[in-house]
Image: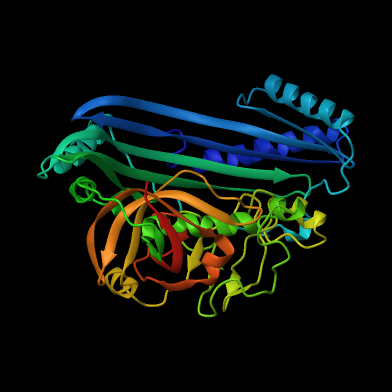
Amino acid sequence: MSEISNNQFALEETKSLLKAIVAKALKKGASAAEVAVTKECGLSVSTRNKDIEVLEFNQDGAFGINLYLGKTKGSASTNDTSPESIEKALDAAYAIAKYTTEDPYSGLADAELMPESCVDLDLYHPAELSPEQAKDVAIATEAAGLAIPGIVNSEGANLNSHDAMKVYANSHGFVEGFLSSRHSLSCSMIAQSEGGMERDYSYSVSRRYPELWTPEQIGVDAAKKAVGRLDARQVKTGAYPVLFSADVASSLWGHLLAGLRGSALYRRSSFLLDKLGEQILPQWVSLQERPHEPGWLGSACFDNDGVATYEKDIVAAGRLESYLLDAYSARRLKMKTTGNAGGVHNLVVSDSGEGLDELVKQVGTGLLVTEMMGHGVNMVNGDYSRGAAGFWIENGEISYPVSGITIASNLATMFSDVVAIGNDIDVRKSIRSGSVLIKSMMVAGN
């Protein structure tokens, strides 16, 4: 299906090419250089009402070159591997570095921080899917959803199967890379009643194609979720417990991670500024980065600076133990890189042991959020206000769907007010979390 598939030779060939590019950069007069490339190719199929809407093979990739002249840096990129194009990219990077203002924090990460070798993280499982097979899977997904009573239309199904190659090299002599695969299947359904129309979706993602949910599971799940949202009501404005379902809870932790990034910290634009060592979550909560889990979606042996990744507690017993720093931000903050150039590599959120049904009972009267809308989050002061939809809970039971509502609070308060985290872990993301119950938020209808 792809040029990358089953081709370890292509990986080694790309490593050699990147080493040669680094050598050329040094020969031009660079004091240091680094080159990274990510190539991706595969098959994408979209169907709508059981007819093919999109069928495409795609192949993308670009070489990113950073060239240093002391403390100045020039960057250029090219998706053409011909000697002429690489030479032009190197010349462009050199010219930029020559006229760029010096930055005392600029430069490669220290050589001793690079991994000596990389273990196989079991990330590469290509699927030999023909276009005909992919089409049949997507159509079967739609068909399963359309068969559910209350469904009147389909917004389509999508099957994607891609292989990727990532390689990084620098003038410390470090060069490493890996192959990976990613497969996904999704479907969106439209339901209708006298009260109007609603849509919802379902999806599955995995490194291994056979581990995806079946077309029937995804189609039926999307359909039942859409039907379940029909005849939504408003809610009375007030302060209530709010339960974020597992598939949207990752957005909460995403905001926390964004506040821990070095770039936000040295710009002093984070609500978590100067919080290292302080209690930011209840004592029973921990957040752990686990970058070397075999087959997980965020696993990686090294970060975008070539620095070795390692397992660490970001939050332990509710206390903030680590920022998320790349080499540049670490220098700005007079700290050490945490191997997080490019973000976190698998975040595991601890749970308090309850299932979703138990958490719903614990809410009593309040809101279960299953969809988020808008981007009303101020990362500087933590103010949080977003559109939401979901279900109203009364007497510990789900009573009816709600929509057109706004939930508001402050992120620092929300994290300190986490009451429980479910054991219904969503494994479809690199942030693995169960449902999250917040003690109280302002909930407002239209």
**Is residue 382 visible to us here?**
yes
Give the percent coordinates (x, y) of residue 37: 61, 38
Give the percent coordinates (x, y) of residue 36: 65, 40
Which residue occupies the foreground of this view, 386 or 176? 386
Give the left or right position of residue 127, taking residue 123 as reference: left
Quadrant for the N terminus in the image: top left
- Quadrant in the picture for residue 248: bottom left
Give the left or right position of residue 209, taking residue 87 as reference: left
Q: Residue at x 59, y 68 (%)?
A: 311
- Quadrant in the picture for residue 243: bottom left
- Quadrant in the picture for residue 52: top left
Q: How many marks?
A: 0
Give the percent coordinates (x, y) of residue 362: 33, 75
Q: Using the image, determine if residue 234 lies above or below residue 152.
A: below
Q: Residue at x 71, y 61 (%)?
A: 273
Q: Using the image, determine if residue 200 lies above or below residue 53.
A: below
Give the left or right position of residue 34, taking residue 134 as reference: right
Give the percent coordinates (x, y) of residue 355: 31, 72
Which residue occupies the foreground of this view, 58 or 102? 102
Q: Residue at x 36, y 71 (%)?
A: 423
Which residue occupies the foreground of this view, 313 or 23? 313
